[in-house]
Amino acid sequence: MSSMSNVAGLSKYIRTFPSTKISIFSMIFISFISGVLIFFIDPSMNLTVLEKIFYGGAFGFGAFGISSIIGGALSQQLITSMKGINLKTKHSMLLALMSMVLVVLIAIIGSIISSIFNIELLTNAVLFGCVLVFAFLIFVFWSTSSIGLFKSAIVACLQPLLILAMLVVVLFLGSADKVFEFGFLSLFVKVIVANIIFLLAIYSFVAVIESPMRKNLGIGLLDFVSLFISHLSDGSGSLEKIFEDIGEPIDTLVGIVSFRRKIKNSPDKNESVEEINYSETNIKSLFISPCVHPGPIGSIGGSNMPTILADRFENFTMVAHGPSTHDFNPVSQKEINKIEDTVKNALKDINYGDKASKFLRYCEINAKVGIQFFNDSMVMLSTFAPFGSDDIEFGVGLSMMSQSKKHCNVKNSVIVDCHNSFNEEKGRVLPGNPEVFHLLDAIDKIKCHSTEKGIKVGCAEDLMEDLDKNNGVGESGLKLMVIEAQDQKMAYILLDSNNMEIGFREEIIKAIKSDDELPIDEVEVMTTDTHFVNTLSNGYNPVGLTKREEIINYIKTSIKDAINDLEPVEVGCSVERIVGLNTFGPNNSIELVSTISSIVAVSKIMAPIIFILAILFVFVWIFYLPGI
């Protein structure tokens, strides 16, 4: 499995938080039940069943429930006052719930052991649970809220101290004389020493895992994590500032296929034919294939580039996936402006004609290339389906472009990575991989068919609004274009998704070709590789895991709409250079991924060692220090 796969696998930890009401209700219910259980477990309680339920529930709610609810509310307010980020009320209450559950579980275990061996362990058990909660909360606050270790420690101690205070109040309610018999000094010493042990353990762990990223990239891991969580929860773009600092400017390419309507009426006397032809309003559709990767995740950088770029044009626009990897992730959304400017400048100079060939496929081993010629240019759709594949590297794309231009003697070759057959175990298609030579050999098989006059294009799109990124579908939904040339209708289908479940492409093609109501001769299904859909817990989140039948029905309906939209057009192609695009860059991209992968690997070893030792020291310290 590649390093990128390891990093993408971390998305399984992304979760949707329950509402504040659910967390508060859960704390009330669980604290009441835990109190009842503790009273039933304790054999010294000479109470009736009803009394144990009543008094036990009151004890649990008073000692654990009220303190946790107050602690959760205060934590959120305090972190907000410290200019911390990410902690909303629902987050704070969920943390309070999780912390309370940990304390009551340890308290119940302590009660069970107490009843078996006839010793008093409840207070020490609750104390041990509170110390663990302190360690848990300080780690969460420090790593997510950007408030530093000292402030995180202050906030983290609120709930544990409230639980201990309420425990003392509830235990000695009505027995004030026994308060003076309670070992407060011993309790205080235990709390202080145990917390220091965990503070040292957490600081040591963070120092170890932060070192590689700070050394290699000059950024702190905790800052990175905090800003990443802020993006997931609030859509914050602050993470882009870090990427801008480590970004590298590159030059890359964008392929453009422009279809413009044929002029039916004579131009106005004051307006030239050329001005009418090249105006944006006269363009029927654009097919753009930028060699820019739509990543890294969510809406950071170029992750939602296919939708953002398409929306910059007044006409119907499809933004496909050109040969590129995460090395070519734009560092910020404003970099998309450079792609837009390049395309719009190219449209002013594109030469149009009305000649086209049929769409034909050529295969070599697992590689397939679909070819269609337009005037003196060609479009090439590449795929390894139904065998898995990931991104085709830019250098490989350049080789394909050069090979096809030379072999077919064309001026422009627009390369598209269809990105339609996901396999997590398959990495990128890099120079030297056998797949590269399969692609080049398939190109050598191309028969350079002659083009003929007469081309029609029909377009359709559907946002598929009842589907979303939970189904692997981005904001642009579905876009498709039917091209009719030489009595052949070819459907270019583009789903705004990050790759496609293996076999779904073939299922779509079969469903379309077997439908007698759809006079389509050839089909190719592509995805935009948008990383807008990658903010969920199922990793890469390819389309086709769910709702297959619904997606196919949307495609069939849109094909009918596109056929009805067919009209004569002229076509022009161009491949242009995008200059000075700030991206992750080959060096930083690899370094970032490998650094995160190494941190994950080191954490799997260091975390158990450091925290198990800390827990053992604290356990011995609390349960074997006399005084309570």
Image (cartoon, grey):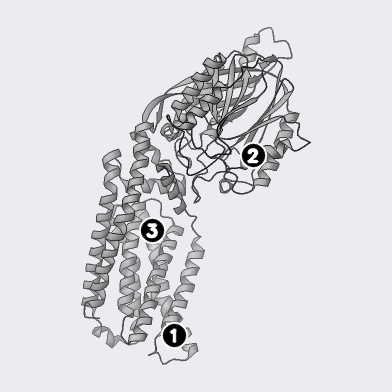
Q: Residues within 10 Å of mark 1 (few under 14, many from 20)?
A: some
Can residue 173 be seen at all in this image of the molecule?
no
> Looking at the image, which residue is at 68% across and 22% down?
358
First of labels 1, 2 by sequence position: 1
- The reply to whether the C-beta atoms of the residues labelled 3 and 1 are less than 8 Å apart is no
Q: Quadrant of the C terminus?
A: bottom left
Amino acid type indicated by mark 1: Phe
Q: Nearer the viewer, residue 46 or 472?
A: 472
- Indicate which label's residue lies in the foreground, 1 or 2: 2
Q: Which residue is mark 2?
A: 506
- The reply to whether the C-beta atoms of the residues labelled 2 and 3 are less than 8 Å apart is no
Q: Which residue is mark 1?
A: 40
> Looking at the image, which residue is at 66% across and 43% down?
551
Residue 611: % across, % down? 29, 62
For the image shown, how many numbered marks are present on the structure?
A: 3
- The reply to whether the C-beta atoms of the residues labelled 1 and 2 are less than 8 Å apart is no
> Looking at the image, which residue is at 50% across and 60% down?
18
Amino acid type indicated by mark 2: Glu
Q: Secondary structure at mark 3?
A: helix
Q: CA distance from mark 3 to mark 1?
A: 37 Å
Amino acid type indicated by mark 3: Gln
Q: Which residue is mark 3?
A: 77
First of labels 3, 1 by sequence position: 1
Q: Is residue 48 above or below residue 519?
A: below
